[in-house]
Image (cartoon, helix red, strand yellow):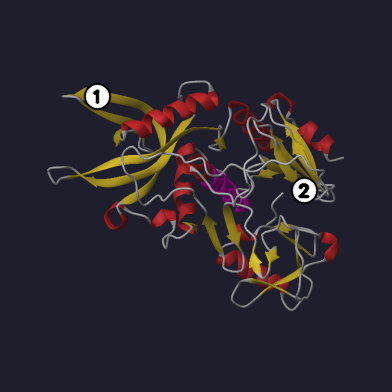
Amino acid sequence: MYNTRFIMSDGSVIYPAYLDREDKEKLRSRQGKQREYLRCGCRLDKNLYYRLSEDLKFYPEHNNYEHDKYCCRYRENGRNRRITAYMYDDSSDEITAFCSFNPRSFSDGEKNDPDDNEQEETSEELPEGEVIVEGAAPEKGDVKEKKEPKLGMPELIRSLNVDTFTDAVMHNIKSESRNSFSKSVYKRMRHVRIAKMKKPIGELSLETDGVRFIYLKYADTYEQTEKGYTKCYIDTLDSDGKTYRNLVYPDALRKAVKAFVKAYGIEPDGNTMIAGFQYVKKGRSGYTYRIIGRLHIFQVSSNGIYSRTLAEQGIYNALEDIVSKNRDIWYMIPPEDPNVAAIVYVEGQPKSLVLAVRSKADQVISYDTEQYVLGVADNPDMITADSVRQSLQ
């Protein structure tokens, strides 16, 4: 499991990606002149200690640290080894998304979601703390050569969504509605930059960049053909309750709807959201218009969490019900590791529950057996407060 956390001398855990300036100033004040106050969350037996400096960045107290290969602080030949496509660097305090597409450009007929982020699966013997969660469907064809991971549209949207959720959890903020959660997504995007782009996603605008990110509640789709030309629209609901009609490329809409039905086996409903990129284009007569070129339609849980399947949606609904009734249980979702559906914490327990949801393909999950217990959730009805507590005893 990909590690980004630090463990403080009192045993409590912090995730630097979710610390704002005020949080860091408070942390540095508590740290004072103490040594060995923070240690990296990987390889606890090695005591890889860090300090928060005057510039509010984390630096190692000693040289030549050797981190676990699944840690964000792992280095090969002095450089970061990238094993995630959604990467936080606590030395630069930046979040970078590595995508398989360039969101600043789009033309009609372009492939909407390149499938460049498929990962290599392995059947080699794995060390302790690293397991294969077998997929629901057998693999077909030859194993592809391993590449640095990249995010397609669905993966980017999920990463932004669960990153927003975890940021809220870390600041004890509970979203009262999906509308408030959507606003939080836009806020979080100001901290996320796509690789090779200067601006964060949240700062892209139609006026200056010709493109902007959208994240809206789905209402309906509409298709109209006149004089041999087909225009497609997707209707969305705003926080004011009004419905807005958005022009979208026909091919992008059809692909998005087809992918949705394939993933969930249902038609869009009240739990459906859309996200993507809207562009400014110029017509033949010289007028300009707005059109959605890259589009993703997806399901969310009762509190707005991106759900890749209906089973995962049910699991997030179950977790939210547990948390609402049990103050000593909470969970977060690491955006850096798509194989982990959630990490569930119970106050007073030395270990945490790593929850994985079975997918069609095999998943390799690495975790520290001294810190975590692995659980595979296939049935939302099996996720209860009692089952969580029992798994950690």
Q: Position of residue 74 (x, y in %)?
A: 70, 63
Mark 1 surroundings within 10 Å by alpha-carbon count, few (fewer than 14), some (14 through 19), many (20 or more): few
Residue lying furthest front in this view? 142
Q: Quadrant of residue 226?
A: top left
Q: Is residue 228 left or right of residue 331?
A: left
SS of the residue at dot 1?
strand
Quarter containing the C terminus: top right
| Amino acid tagged 1 | Gln
| Amino acid tagged 2 | Tyr
Mark 2 surroundings within 10 Å by alpha-carbon count, few (fewer than 14), some (14 through 19), many (20 or more): some
Residue lying furthest top in this view? 266
Q: CA distance from mark 2 to mark 1?
A: 52 Å
Any mark on residue 367, and which? 2
Q: Name the dominant secondary structure of the magenta segment.
A: helix
**Closest to the observer, 29 or 88:** 88
What range of the chain is rendered magenta?
A: 158-173
Q: Position of residue 105 (x, y in %)?
A: 35, 50
Q: Is residue 160 magenta?
A: yes
Q: Position of residue 23 (x, y in %)?
A: 61, 64
Q: Position of residue 253 (x, y in %)?
A: 37, 31
Q: Is residue 38 magenta?
A: no
The answer to whether residue 25 is visible is yes
The answer to whether residue 327 is visible is no
Q: Quadrant of residue 236?
A: top left
Any mark on residue 224, and which? 1
Say if 335 sits above or below 69 in the image.
above
**Closest to the observer, 373 or 360:** 360
| Label 2 or label 1, whichever comes before in sequence order | 1
Residue lying furthest left in this view? 285
Q: Quadrant of residue 36?
A: bottom right
